[in-house]
Amino acid sequence: MTSAPTDTRRRTPGGVGESASRPDGVPKVRGEFAFSSDLWADGAAWGATVRSPHAHARIVEVSTAAALALPGVLAVLTHEDVTGVNRFGLEHRDQPVLAQDRVRYQGEPVALVAADHPETARRAAELVEVGYAVLPPVTDARAAVRGECEPLHEGGNTVRHVRLRHGDPEATAEVVVTGEYEVGMQDQAFLGPESGLAVPAPDGGVDLYVATQWLHVDRGQVAAALGLDEELVRITLAGVGGAFGAREDLSIQVHACLLALRIGRPVKMVYSREESFFGHVHRHPAWMRYEHGADRDGRLVYVRAEIVLDGGAYASSTPAVVGNAGTMGAGPYAVPNVSIDCYGAYTNNPPCGAMRGFGAVQAAFAYESQMDRLGEAVGVDPVEIRVRNALTEGDRIATGQVLDSAAPVAELVRRVRDLPLPPPPTADLRALPGGVGNTTHGEGVRRGVGYAVGIKNVGFSEGFDDYSTARVSVEAVGGEPLATVHTAAVEVGQGLVALQQQIVRTELGLARVRVATADTTVGSAGSTSASRQSYVTGGAVQAACREVAGELLARASESAGVAAELLRLEDGRVTGPGDVSIDVADLVADEPVVHTVEWHHRPTSPLDPETGQGDAHVQLAFAAHRAVVDVDVELGLVKVVALDCAQDVGHALNPGAVVGQIHGGSAQGLGLAVMEEIQVVDGLVRNPSFTDYLIPTMLDMPPMRVDVLELADPHAPYGLRGVGEPPTISSTPAVVAAIRAATGLALTRVPVRPEHLTGT
């Protein structure tokens, strides 16, 4: 990793700017970390779900008699047993807790079973008899938004339409390139399946321990479905085995609580891998038509696009994904005239929602493919065509918003171009497409190099009041100061627990920092998504620490008779002029210092409904990739030889974690480029397993060179910029561009499969 410019600030040991170790790292590596599926309680029963085998059907009848007759079965619940509102949803509560009269996708929950053994629960679920009248499924998202299909919800099949008009919608250009592109349905493929434990409480409420991404939104939906006040639903984060967006929506939360409250015993639920594919949302498949107009030198005059995202049976976060795909749809380029229409559709395909990149991934595949076509049309190489059109600070994006912090798009592309290339292909089978399968000895293998750059918003947009809450306390324990930070921010593997410790060490100069388990007894921290937690929870922890520091210094000032502004915190002491040196433990021996702060980032604004104009985003982030591939053009096999990245991160709060995020995001982008797709035919999933749904392994991931820029954002805590999503956005189009360079094929759909390369 290289970094520019050099950071000369004083670093606190284990503080901000250090590659501090993660307290959850060693237990996870050793297999000692408790994930949500490891939870247990005395007397716990097991829950199971009855799901629809059909993509679209009317429910004629439900018979639970045979299931209830099975020894060990404690309860069987249907929609009639939902004690509150039989609806939930992130943005629109349009999804039933248990289907009532109709199922709208394969795998939709119809009934629940509680039993004293997991196998008994599964057998009982199979004995629940559901009569269906199968209906024709709506599976074509484009036809759905055109109004050519049966409406699946009141109001029709369009979840949202974002209309962007910037500049002259009738602009003309000397050079025009057009293309149609498709992105398949990608799964988040987290390793820890949906699971949790619900425990009924003496006060009539319930305590839920669950792997999730958004504790407080879960609580609101669960409480409404149970018919309880929110204060009676207490949610504690359990160990999360990956998320990537899929845990933003509810899975077992309401179901486990319903069963626990019905039988008066704790209930544990754990999905199988196959059930997990039906139990969470996926990345939206997309169809996109683009037209780019430019002058003879390749400088963009206009971009026109139509984007259709298949949201599946229920809304989930489709409205926000549509907003992202539309507002990011012109890419990281200065375009004076933009006309984009982006739609989200209801269909009977599996529900789709949040996944890393959140709409920007789909759009980037199209606009970056277009940029390569434009470069070819004007005789300019892939790097130069991007450099000529690159956004820079002070430019306006498609929504009319001015970029008011660093936007080093051209520099990122040049930097990734200038990284050393891998050596030429060798005869070593392990380095060739097909590997030790001995499919080739180099004959028919062609090498290609491709480039791509992407843009992504950080945080929630379009006027959403985005904030986080942090409570920080300092007390004396064992004669030494101990700081405790408590937030509801969810650790999903990104290193947030370590980061909170780093911020406290930096702000308070204390070595001992405890991070309390995230739960709903503290104010909301929002979702762990949108690359936002370092920004908003980092900002909240920083602000709470500064309140604590102010009180500590005030106490020291009173004790020492020295003005507080002359004192400072370092190494567990308050020091100042002369021989002032007071142990922080002494300052809090009688009374701890505790401060809670609700921290909001600067406001954003909604999009104008007619033009899509507005300052919708709090921050934008950029990354660029160069991919090198070897392709066996006879068999259609692809070996990604190198996948190098340059990314501006503002300020690397934990450099090791930053590089890890870039590696991980790039791996998911590689997966979408060449292997990952949920195969859906007539609304039915064909490959709900890791046997048939393929994800990259360490053998598929090439070595990565990562070039990190640190151009501070003056509006963000510590100057940071969100890191997690940008590498997922530009990696996919870079890999596909490299395959095009090797084969000369157009390749307008991802993932690229062998038959796309061989014509078979």
Image (cartoon, grey):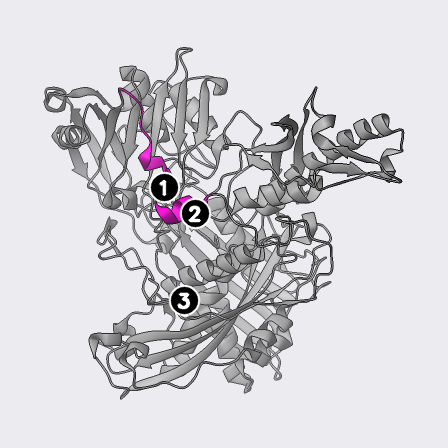
Residue 39 inside the magenta-drawn segment: yes
Judging by the rendered image, the residue that carries numbered circle 1 is 32
Instruction: Report the mark closest to the observer, 1 or 3.
Output: 1
Amino acid at the residue labelled 3? Tyr
Badge 3 or badge 2: first in the primary sequence: 2
Badge 1 or badge 3: first in the primary sequence: 1
Q: Is residue 93 above or below residue 79?
A: below
Q: Position of residue 510 (x, y in %)?
A: 66, 39
Marks 1 and 3, Cα distance to the nearest angstrom?
45 Å
Q: Position of residue 712 (x, y in %)?
A: 70, 58
Amino acid at the residue labelled 2? Val
- Please report contact status of discs 3 and 2: CB closer than 8 Å, yes or no: no
Judging by the rendered image, the residue that carries numbered circle 3 is 181
Residue 628 inside the magenta-drawn segment: no
Q: Describe residue 732's horizontal placement relative to residue 685 as left or right.
A: right
Q: Residue at x 34, y 32 (%)?
A: 196
Marks 1 and 2, Cα distance to the nearest angstrom?
8 Å
Q: Residue at x 89, y 32 (%)?
A: 562
Amino acid at the residue labelled 1? Glu
- Residue 169 visible (yes or no): no
Quarter containing the C terminus = bottom left
Quarter containing the N terminus = bottom right
Q: Few, some or many C-alpha atoms within 10 Å of disc 2 (few <14, some 14-19, many ≥20)?
A: few
Dot 1 falls on a residue whose secondary structure is: loop
Range of magenta residues: 24-43
Based on the displayed image, in which of its 4 quarters is residue 679 positioned?
Answer: bottom left
Based on the displayed image, in which of its 4 quarters is residue 383 positioned?
Answer: bottom right
Dot 3 falls on a residue whose secondary structure is: strand
- Please report contact status of discs 1 and 2: CB closer than 8 Å, yes or no: yes
